[in-house]
Image (cartoon, grey):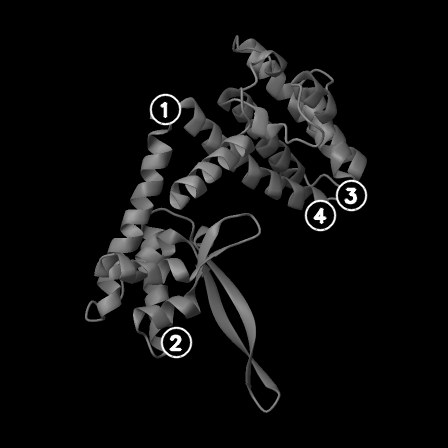
Amino acid sequence: MSKIILKNSIFEDIKHIDEEELEYWSARELQKVLGYKEWRKFNNIIGKAKTSCIKSGDNVLNHFVQLDKMVNIGSMTKRKIIDYKLSRYACYLIAQNGDSHLENIALAQTYFAIQARKQELLETNIDELTELERRKYQRDLTKKANLLLNKTASKSGVKNFDKFHNAGYKGLYNGETANDIAKRKNLRYREDILDNMGSVELAANLFRITQAESKIKNENIMGENNCNVAHNQIGKIVRKAIKEAGGLMPENLPTPNKSLKELKTNRETCKKMSQML
């Protein structure tokens, strides 16, 4: 392993994944890795990075989320300090505005620029991916979107999430519940139906999920029944859009031969076997 790869790992080592499965970095941890001894000086760099973010046309709050933390300072005493939850782009801007004399600043500039480019290529070249790669990509997005939908629905009073999600499925699948969909696909008990969808079907569900979350939040819909009605309405709207566009109804789309979970298990088994040889 090269020296550069070893050094790049320092940024991977301090990367976190939040409850919505999104990556982020702690400003306090990044400060130490970049070689800043004083928070005051590093906070000035963060301020410059925020200005750069604004000039680029991005929303600062999407990349720099301020956190207040309580830390022990000895003798059973705690003090409140400021930290930031930083996106990959925020880290890149901090590195760009940092002290170029510090060894890890140049490394950080390269690392976060490459990571940002990788994400850009993934998003830009989605049309060039194979069907399996599209399935994986869309499935990852639906996981994140469902976490956000559940969070929003919970704040609005939803407790029975099976009923809530079935309301959306019923709207999109012409009355079918999750169990109905699973039976039609000949799935085993409790097998994830989303893992057994093609990329087109996943995309339809992703649209349903994101629009339901947006409607509940933006219209300030409260109460479990009202949220269920809203989710069902969104499902019907997505179904109508598919019909008007001349697409196949989701229940008529083919089910892949293998689930994403099964494919992942097979890959891991093959990898273990190859390591034993």
Mark 1 or mark 2, earlier in chain: 2
The residue nearer to you, when weighing 4 against 112, is 4
To which residue does mark 3 refer? 159
The residue nearer to you, when weighing 126 against 158, is 126
Residue 224 is situated, as x and y percent measured from the top left of the image, at 79, 38
Q: Secondary structure at mark 4?
A: helix
125 w.r.t. 16: above or below: above
Mark 4 or mark 2, earlier in chain: 2
- Comparing labels 2 and 3, the label whose residue is closer to the camera: 3
To which residue does mark 4 refer? 155
Label 4 to label 1: alpha-carbon separation: 36 Å
Mark 4 or mark 1, earlier in chain: 1
**Disc 1 residue type (three-letter):** Asp
To which residue does mark 2 refer? 39
Q: Are marks 1 and 3 in contact (CB under 8 Å)?
A: no
Residue 69 in sight in this render: yes
**Disc 3 residue type (three-letter):** Lys
Q: Secondary structure at mark 3?
A: loop
The residue nearer to you, when weighing 262 against 172, is 262
User: Residue 107 falls in which quadrant of the image?
Assistant: bottom left
Residue 26 is situated, as x and y percent measured from the top left of the image, at 45, 64
To which residue does mark 1 refer? 127
**Dot 2: within a 10 Å radius of its alpha carbon, few (fewer than 14), some, or many (20 or more) residues?**
some
Label 4 to label 3: alpha-carbon separation: 10 Å
Q: Residue at x 50, y 63 (%)?
A: 66
198 w.r.t. 263: above or below: above
70 w.r.t. 1: above or below: below
Label 2 to label 3: alpha-carbon separation: 43 Å
The residue nearer to you, when weighing 230 against 117, is 117
Q: Residue at x 57, y 16 (%)?
A: 241
Q: Secondary structure at mark 1?
A: helix
